[in-house]
Amino acid sequence: MDETKPHLIYFADAMCSWCWGFAPVTEAIERAFGPALPIRLIVGGLRPGTTERMNDKTKAMIRSHWEHVRDATAQPFDFGFFDRDDFVYDSHPAARAVVAMRDLMPQATLPFFRAVQHAFYASNADVTRIDTLVALAAAMGGPQANLRAALAIEANDRETWTDYAIAQKTGVTGFPTLIAGTGADNRYTLITQGYQPEASVLALIDAWQSENRLDL
């Protein structure tokens, strides 16, 4: 992505339920603006490195979030997820796969991110498993062998943690967060921090575009 031109930066996590709720909004942005306003995805790091299995209290808390997102966005959820007894909600493997795909096939970053989201939330797939992530990449024509190899090297892990650090340094305190830059300088404008529906987000982008006199 050419950061000297107008662009959006999207801070999100594939295992963040509100980011799953926001998935149709990112698709709407792509439909509305196309390549004139590219979106760069930065993985924020929801629960990287978690090692504890979910207990009943954690399940109840996460389920309430999912129900709230479902009701607010109409996105599909498979609540069979909560029948698992041994799931470790570690968001790091999925984040690493997204970062690897961003390096291998930049144009497929967001589609792959949404595929991971759909697999986890709507299909109850275990996206903490490398085999699951590689299969998702292969299903969309991704470089299966290259992705598996990328996930085996330390450089991919470092790059993923660098993304987390960028999110923290930028002051992102929740996901999804979307910011916009004109490319003319290092100034960025907050579009949304937290979920907003498609119409609101598109209106905010239009206002930013008008304020900066951009012809997208």
Image: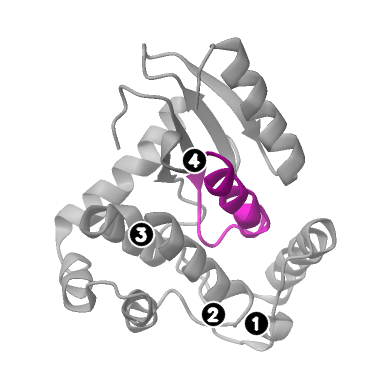
Residue type for callout 1? Phe
* Residue picked out by circle 1: 81
- Circle 3 crowding by C-alpha within 10 Å: few under 14, some 14–19, many from 20: some
* Residue picked out by circle 3: 108
Return the mark for residue 10: 4
The Cα–Cα distance between marks 3 and 2, rounded to whole angstroms, is 28 Å
Label 3 element class: helix
Residue at the location (33% across, 83% down)?
131
The Cα–Cα distance between marks 2 and 1, rounded to whole angstroms, is 9 Å
Q: Quadrant of residue 95?
A: bottom left
Q: Are marks 2 and 1 in contact (CB under 8 Å)?
A: yes
Label 1 element class: helix
Choose the circle earlier in sequence order: 3 or 1: 1
The Cα–Cα distance between marks 1 and 4, rounded to whole angstroms, is 27 Å
Q: Are marks 1 and 4 in contact (CB under 8 Å)?
A: no
Q: Quadrant of residue 5?
A: top left
Q: Is residue 79 inside the magenta stretch?
A: no
The Cα–Cα distance between marks 2 and 4, rounded to whole angstroms, is 28 Å
- Circle 4 crowding by C-alpha within 10 Å: few under 14, some 14–19, many from 20: many
Query: Quick one: 205 or 148, which is closer to the camera?
Result: 205
Q: Nearer the viewer, mark 3 or mark 2?
A: 3
The Cα–Cα distance between marks 3 and 1, rounded to whole angstroms, is 27 Å
* Residue picked out by circle 2: 87
